[in-house]
Amino acid sequence: MVQFRSVTKSFGGSSPAVLDVSFHLRKGEFAFLTGASGAGKTTILKLVHMLHRPSSGEVRVSRYSSSRIKRRDLPDLRRRVGYIFQDFRLLENLTAEENIAFALQVTGTAKAKIAPRVRKLLNQVGLAARAQAFPRELSGGEQQRVAVARALANEPLVLLADEPTGNLDERASSGVFELFRRINASGTSVLMATHDAELLRRHRNVRVIELEEGRLVFDSAGDPVA
């Protein structure tokens, strides 16, 4: 599903953001991507989304390769890869349902299919009663659930989450994590970046991929670490 093969990414500084990283996230798998701030977690997620290309090595996502993908194929790739940001990035002038609908509109979904899909997603994340609320009227946990629904709008094969519980209290954090587990149980692969040690401690059965200064230093799945 997602494969890194000896991937290095530099941005012109003295040290690469990611250095010689290799791992394989399989279909339907859930994994934590962890490490201190600046370890390279966000860079890894952006490489999967192909917002960045490797300086060397290869990233494969489903049938797409960072070495060969054409610009015209990027929209199709990104429909297959949902991305959830720590700061939600909701459009403040749109309601919860309009934020989700917008993700479908920009990918050319037929107008007749949008409203039923939005209703289904709001039910899935437990926000059917808040469909008409604007982001400013929602709690942090509710805003994150809208962001999750938006990321799921185009039924991605892989869901990327960048510190999705970082700005939430413990109760909201637990609720969002359990939502991810249900999404994963339906067959979507999940790669969740976090430095929340308590979250890792509570869910020791989840695969952990750990980065340190851009290097992969631990993988609980037992994949080789150079």
Image: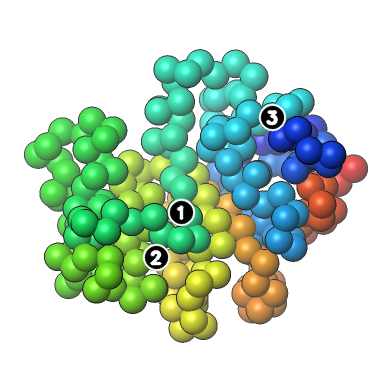
Residue 219 showing in the rendered view: no
Q: Residue at x 23, y 61 (%)?
A: 96
In the image, which disc is placed on residue 54? 3
CA separation, marks 3 and 1?
A: 21 Å
CA separation, marks 1 and 2?
A: 8 Å
Q: Position of residue 189 (x, y in %)?
A: 52, 49
Q: Position of residue 58 (x, y in %)?
A: 70, 27
Q: Position of residue 35 (x, y in %)?
A: 74, 60
Q: Residue at x 60, y 23 (%)?
A: 65
Q: Which residue is mark 1?
A: 84
Viewport quadrant of the C terminus: top right
Neighbourhood count class around disc 1 (C-alpha, 10 Å): few under 14, some 14–19, many 20 upward: many
Quadrant of the rendered structure where residue 114 is?
A: top left
Relative placement, left or right, of 31 versus 36 is left
Relative placement, left or right, of 173 versus 144 is right
Q: Which residue is mark 2?
A: 144
Is there a contact, CB below 8 Å, between mark 1 and mark 2?
yes
Q: Which amino acid, mark 2?
A: Gln
146 is higher (above) or lower (below) than 191: below
CA separation, marks 2 and 3?
A: 29 Å
Relative placement, left or right, of 100 versus 219 is left
Viewport quadrant of the N terminus: top right
Neighbourhood count class around disc 3 (C-alpha, 10 Å): few under 14, some 14–19, many 20 upward: many
In the image, which disc is placed on residue 208? none
